[in-house]
């Protein structure tokens, strides 16, 4: 059955893909299987926003610099060289194009999978944590940035 | 029955018309939408008529705007109340603050009764993160803005709202006017107040994404010529029979309202409503 599924997916894929897509399941504990979740209540924008990240792992911290592959009100997606275990806490610093200082937001790794397009690279989804304060200035600034980008996209 | 609108934004907005209310039936439907949505959020108490009526809606200068979908009817609404001797709805909590603007000889109007049908987007969709909801909201603001610029001499818009909506109004760059207060008309929910100077937004039009939407071509008054004008029968039906708004008004308020409709016979409009069946029907 498993072999049939792999064969099926490889024959239905576009010709330039020669390997079936593999999805890496990240396990927190041996008995727990993390389900890949994608709950979109916010629109994704295909923006490459430069960002720094610091992920808190059990053994220490993992930090790096990359660009987002897309952003939304709920979080960001990126590609990086390291595997990151959900639901690790992380801090993201976004270098937004609004001309102001970099914006630091708290989040957690919501999913991680091996990239089907880039070998030895991982696609990661980070979900931002809701602010505890409804007038959190950082949250407001991020909201305004997203809204502005949405308007630019749909109004030109 | 409304279903989710999954199309892309242009397809979503194409069958939606944004305009001023033209008939009493539309006014009632829009008002009922406000009532339903406010009730869900505990902004008003339940009542038997399913409407959120006030004396301000009886004024001929009050304007209500709607987003009406070709298939699904009225899916959004917003109203504008121009200042008058009756004041503004938010004077209840922010009279001192609005008076500061009045003392500057600014003509003030209040934006109020904004409501979108929550069946369209679900409960967890935040306006600023969702293109369809954002553009639906902004297009409603735009038609109101066009009316304001084409048909009124209003200098300053004011609004009061629950602090959880502050992010949206800050995005529209409304400036602080009044701090956190309890607003009785919103079922004693917390409220903050903001204001916006029309000329200043015009100056900022090039720099702000939403203002570019508001300040396209100079608006014409033509689209607003069909604005709903309440007849004596409408005033009686809505504000006496349906809800005792006029009967609860003070003599000063009634005198001003009557002066807005000099040809109407208010003694007939205000005749007590007898809900008992007519004898010849039994």
Image (tube, coloured by chain):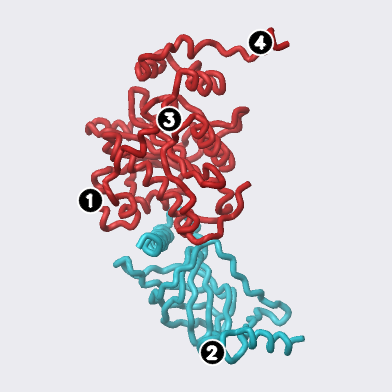
Chain colours: A cyan, B red
Circle 3 crowding by C-alpha within 10 Å: few under 14, some 14–19, many from 20: some
Circle 1 crowding by C-alpha within 10 Å: few under 14, some 14–19, many from 20: few
| Most distant residue in the top direction | B279
Q: In the displayed structure, does residue B95 sit left or right of residue A62?
A: left
Tags 4 and 1 both on a single chain: yes
Helix, strand or loop at label 1? It is helix
Q: Are marks 4 and 1 in contact (CB under 8 Å)?
A: no
* CA separation in Å, label 4 and label 3: 31 Å
First of labels 4, 1 by sequence position: 1
Tags 1 and 2 both on a single chain: no
Tags 3 and 2 both on a single chain: no
Q: Which residue is mark 4?
A: B278
Helix, strand or loop at label 3? It is loop
Is B115 drawn above or below residue A109 in the view shown? Answer: above
* CA separation in Å, label 2 and label 4: 81 Å
Residue B99 picture quarter: top left
> Given the image, what chain letter belongs to the residue carrying mark 1?
B
* CA separation in Å, label 3 and label 2: 61 Å
Q: Which residue is mark 2?
A: A16
> Looking at this view, is A49 or A150 the one in front?
A150
Q: Which residue is mark 1?
A: B203
Image coords of residue A149 (percent x, y): 39, 64
Helix, strand or loop at label 4? It is loop
> Looking at this view, is A4 or B154 the one in front?
A4
């Amino acid at each position: 059955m498993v072999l049939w599924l792999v064969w099926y997916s490889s024959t239905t894929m576009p010709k330039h893909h020669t390997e079936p897509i593999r999805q890496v399941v990240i396990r927190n504990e041996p008995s727990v299987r993390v389900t890949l979740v994608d709950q979109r209540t916010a629109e994704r924008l295909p923006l490459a926003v430069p960002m720094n990240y610091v992920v808190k792992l059990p053994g220490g911290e993992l930090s790096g610099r990359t660009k987002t592959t897309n952003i939304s009100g709920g979080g960001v997606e990126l590609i990086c060289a390291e595997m990151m275990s959900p639901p690790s806490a992380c801090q993201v610093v976004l270098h937004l194009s609004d001309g102001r200082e970099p914006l630091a937001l708290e989040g957690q790794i919501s999913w991680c999978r091996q990239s089907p397009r880039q070998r030895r690279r991982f696609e990661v989804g980070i979900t931002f944590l809701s602010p505890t304060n409804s007038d959190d200035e950082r949250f407001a600034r991020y909201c305004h940035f997203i809204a502005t980008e949405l308007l630019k996209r749909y109004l030109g | 029955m409304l279903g989710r609108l999954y199309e892309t934004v242009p397809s979503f907005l194409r069958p939606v018309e944004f305009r001023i209310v033209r008939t009493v039936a539309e006014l009632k439907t829009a008002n009922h939408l406000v009532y339903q949505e406010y009730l869900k959020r505990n902004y008003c108490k339940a009542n038997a008529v399913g409407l959120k009526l006030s004396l301000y809606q009886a004024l001929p200068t009050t304007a209500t705007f709607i987003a009406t979908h070709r298939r699904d009817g009225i899916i959004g609404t917003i109203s504008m109340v121009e200042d008058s001797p009756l004041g503004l709805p938010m004077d209840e909590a922010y009279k001192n603050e609005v008076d500061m603007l009045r003392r500057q000889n600014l003509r003030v109007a209040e934006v109020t009764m904004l409501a979108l049908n929550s069946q369209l987007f679900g409960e967890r969709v935040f306006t600023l993160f969702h293109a369809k909801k954002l553009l639906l909201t902004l297009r409603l603001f735009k038609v109101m803005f066009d009316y304001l610029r084409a048909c009124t001499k209003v200098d300053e818009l004011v609004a009061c709202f629950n602090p959880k909506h502050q992010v949206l109004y800050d995005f529209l760059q409304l400036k602080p006017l009044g701090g956190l207060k309890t607003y009785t008309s919103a079922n004693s929910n917390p409220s903050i107040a903001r204001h916006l100077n029309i000329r200043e937004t015009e100056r900022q039009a090039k720099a702000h994404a939403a203002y570019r939407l508001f300040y396209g071509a100079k608006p014409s008054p033509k689209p607003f010529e069909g604005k709903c004008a309440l007849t004596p029968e409408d005033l009686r039906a809505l504000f006496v029979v349906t809800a005792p708004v006029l009967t609860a008004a003070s003599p000063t308020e009634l005198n001003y309202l009557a002066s807005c409709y000099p040809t109407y016979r208010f003694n007939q409009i205000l005749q007590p409503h007898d809900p008992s069946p007519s004898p010849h029907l039994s």
